[in-house]
Amino acid sequence: MPIFEMYKRHLARLRPENGRGDIRRPGHLVRRLAEDIWKTTEAGHPVAIHIGEGINHYFHATLHNRAIVICR
């Protein structure tokens, strides 16, 4: 099975309406974030999500980024 098909199947269960399942956030906030990003990019503006910019800016931020990408 191609990797993108596997990823698509994995992401299919991560729906906002599933509430606090794997995404651990209320569904309405996830949907609001998605809508805000969509509206911003439709208006031609860039969007950036910054993580790991506190005291853990270097080493731990790298670990956090890897964990997000791997997503279990």
Image (spheres, grey):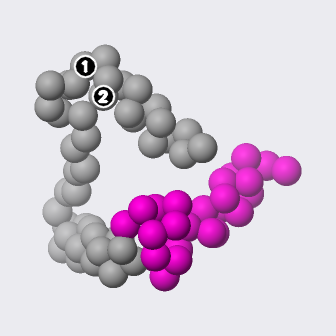
* Residue at left offset 20%, top offset 25%: 57
Is disc 2 placed on a helix, strand or loop?
A: helix
Spot occupied by residue 28 in the image (x, y as percentages of width and height): 33, 81
Q: Amino acid at mark 1?
A: Tyr
- The quadrant of the image that shows the C terminus is top right
| C-alpha span from label 1 to label 2 | 5 Å
Q: What's the mark number on residue 12?
A: none
* Residue at left offset 22%, top offset 44%: 50
* Residue at left offset 52%, top offset 61%: 22
Q: Residue furthest top?
A: 59
Query: Residue 14 vs residue 23: left or right?
Result: right
Is disc 1 placed on a helix, strand or loop?
A: loop
Residue 70: image quadrant is top right
Spot occupied by residue 42 in the image (x, y as percentages of width and height): 26, 74
**Residues at circles 1 and 2 in contact by the CB criterion of under 8 Å:** yes
Q: Is 50 rendered above or below residue 20?
A: above
Q: What's the mark number on residue 61?
A: 2
Q: Is 18 rendered above or below residue 13?
A: below
Q: Around disc 1, counting alpha carbons within 10 Å, would you say few (fewer than 14), some (14 to 19), or many (20 or more)?
A: few
Q: Which residues are magenta?
A: 1-25
* Residue denoted by label 1: 58
Query: Residue 10 vs residue 23: left or right?
Result: right
Q: Is residue 38 visible?
A: no
Q: How many marks?
A: 2
Q: Nearer the viewer, residue 15 or 26?
A: 26
Q: Amino acid at mark 2?
A: Ala
Spot occupied by residue 13 in the image (x, y as percentages of width and height): 62, 69
Q: Is residue 58 visible?
A: yes
Q: Around disc 2, counting alpha carbons within 10 Å, would you say few (fewer than 14), some (14 to 19), or many (20 or more)?
A: some
* Residue at left offset 25%, top offset 50%: 49
